């Protein structure tokens, strides 16, 4: 599993968050998507990395700009998770 944090320029409101979430779900196989116009980022949980250039292209088609992209391993933390 991968956790991807995409810094996005152009989000102004809650509706922008919804548009980005829908765009990501429609174009990529993801488990979870959460956007925040306040932080200017979208957090994506997926089985595999999402191609950066493809995400940039799809966002550009909707008028948003991808300004940063961080991908890191993700481990689901359950109720009985113990930190290492």
Image (tube, helix red, strand yellow):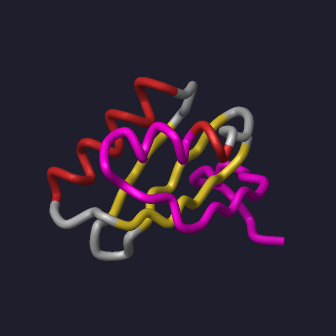
| Nearer to us in this view, 1 or 14 | 14
Bounds of the magenta span? 55-84
Name the quarter where the C terminus is drawn: bottom right
Expressed as whole percent of the image width and height from the top left, the position of residue 51 reads 69, 39
In percent of the image, x 31 and y 42: which residue is there? 62
| Nearer to us in this view, 34 or 26 | 26
The residue at the far right in this view is: 84
Question: Where is residue 5, by image quadrant?
Answer: bottom right
The residue at the far bottom in this view is: 39
* 2 displayed left or right of 21: right
| Nearer to us in this view, 66 or 40 | 66
Expressed as whole percent of the image width and height from the top left, the position of residue 70 reads 68, 63
Above-or-below relation of 66 to 18: below
Expressed as whole percent of the image width and height from the top left, the position of residue 34 reads 39, 52
In percent of the image, x 34 and y 45: which residue is there? 20
Expressed as whole percent of the image width and height from the top left, the position of residue 69 reads 63, 61
**60 drawn magenta:** yes
| Nearer to us in this view, 16 or 29 | 16
* 55 displayed left or right of 75: left
**78 drawn magenta:** yes
* 36 displayed left or right of 81: left
Question: Where is residue 53, by image quadrant?
Answer: top right
Question: Where is residue 45, by image quadrant?
Answer: top right
Name the quarter where the N terminus is drawn: top right
Above-or-below relation of 54 to 56: above
């Amino acid at each position: 599993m991968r956790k991807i944090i995409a810094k996005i320029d152009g989000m102004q409101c809650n509706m922008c968050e919804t548009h980005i979430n829908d765009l990501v779900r429609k174009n990529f196989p993801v488990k979870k998507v959460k956007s925040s116009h306040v932080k200017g980022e979208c957090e994506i949980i997926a089985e595999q990395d999402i191609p950066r250039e493809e995400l940039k292209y799809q966002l550009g088609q909707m008028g948003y700009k991808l300004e940063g992209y961080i991908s890191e391993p993700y481990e689901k933390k359950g109720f009985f998770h113990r930190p290492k």
